[in-house]
Amino acid sequence: MKEARLMDRHSVQRDAMDDGTCTRCGAPSEGEHCSPCREELLTLARSALQWAGEKRPPAIDMSAESATPDMPSFAAPPAGAQPYHGFPLLENVTASGFRLGMITNFLAFPETRGDAYVIAPDGSRAGLVWEETDRTYFEQAGPISEDRWGVWAAGFVHPMRSKADARKNLETIVPGLRDAWQRWVRGEYDEMLPTSELIERQRELLESEDPEVVARANLDLGELLEEDGDTDGAMAAFSRAMASPLQWSVAWGAYRMAGLYTMRGMTEQAEEALRYAIAIGVSPLTGLAALELGALLERQENSAGAKAAYQIAMGSDDGDAAAAAANQLAFLLQAEGDAEAAEKLYREIVESGSPEAAGWAAYNLGLLLERRGDAQEAREVWQKSAESEHANGDAAYALGRLLEADGDTAGALEAYRVAVNTIPADDIGFPAVAAASLLDDVGEIEEAVRMDARAIDTGVPRHMGWALTNLGRILERLGDHDDAEQAYRDAIALGVPEVTEAAGRYLERTA
């Protein structure tokens, strides 16, 4: 992705300032913000600056009993304590009898993801892993056991800034919480076995007289041993699967062996194993093995071989593998200078590929069009992707860049928000700092701080540097010149040249 630009321009003042009201809450104010709002925004920005790049402490229930005097209660719960003992229960954060407890202290820092727990009407507990998203979801992330009714992953559409926000988000997942809790009440526990016991079970199945049972046991055993770090044992299990009289077992064994060969740097053996898996012709596997072979050959700079492998994958009956191979082939063609063939493939994938493949094809197609000078068509391609149900975050970010350059602040912000909500958390820095800069310009300081905090959490120096510089601008705008100066100095200390130049310019103005 291209560099996010930090805009050095005057902040946009909202009309509300002209009629003597706070731009945040509407209360009478001589300045942009009334005193209470200004203090809240300062606290938020200072918190983001204070914890920049550091692991933040969890929320702690200071009244909870600890079994060890010099340890926090959550780390040393007394005998018989319930799960999540030592973490505070949020007062009045209830929905249909369910109560929310806080582990990640979102009240002290502008968090966008974290851990929590839920207490059911009967007092039983479950874990909750939450994140801010553009859609509500509720999925199982841990087993239902005798002492708790599972661990659940949840997507919240409202920011987690206050108890009121937490209550609104809790209400959105009540149906899922109720179903999970009732499963626990009925005693529908999920079986939890240690890896060693699972491995032993598969070894016992190897004694079966049924070839299919033995073949499946070898494949499952190989996967378990690989996960457990025993690659020699895994290779032995996959080799036995390849010795089976069943074609599907041979093909899958060869495919899994190729993965282990690749991990060990044995590229020739990996290539041979993948070609063997493809030659057997087991339908569900052919496309996947050909896709892996193409990537392997491409890394070896064997362009002709990679193209041939991708063509095989594209002809398979695995739609996802076929679309992914088409994307890879188009990218390879583009890199070799055959833009016409690449464009044709990208357009085919956008129109008929799987949602994920179509999203990546749209992003790459837009880049191709932009480089060719067709910015308007690139925008249309990215716009369609960003507005789709399965939006591609990189396409949304690219769209935001174009819209911002054209002066469409509202459109750019919307595109950046889509990007932040769809790109993996470790890579959201560019759209997050771009959004934060624009949000500051239009007076949406609270959301700007939250975007900067998300960029800081990536741990990437460039992203952190831009975010710290943004925070400095916000603190300066709120009248805190000392903390603004510290933010600029922290940004400069990261050693990113372009950040140093921008932060240095602001520092000179502040000093």
Image: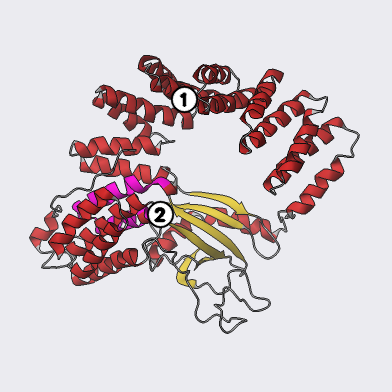
**Residue 303 in sight:** yes
Sequence-wise first label, 2 or 1: 1
- Disc 2 residue type (three-letter): Gly
- Name the one closer to the observer, 125 or 321: 321
Residue 76 falls in image quadrant: bottom right
Helix or strand or loop: what does disc 2 sit on?
loop
Please identify the quadrant where the N terminus is shown.
Answer: top left
Residue for point 13% across, 52% down? 10
Residue 456 falls in image quadrant: bottom left
Q: Main secondary structure of the magenta part?
A: helix
Q: Position of residue 69 (x, y in %)?
A: 58, 84
Q: Is residue 391 magenta?
A: no
Q: Is residue 438 magenta?
A: yes
Q: Position of residue 241 (x, y in %)?
A: 78, 32
Q: Which residue is mark 1?
A: 327
The residues tagged by marks 2 and 1 sit, at their Cα atoms, a distance apart of 30 Å
Q: Position of residue 395 (x, y in %)?
A: 36, 34
Query: Within 10 angstroms of label 1, few (less than 14), some, or many (20 or more) residues?
Result: many
Magenta part of the protein: which range? Answer: 427-455
Q: Which residue is mark 2?
A: 459
Q: Residue furthest bottom?
A: 69
- Disc 1 residue type (three-letter): Asn
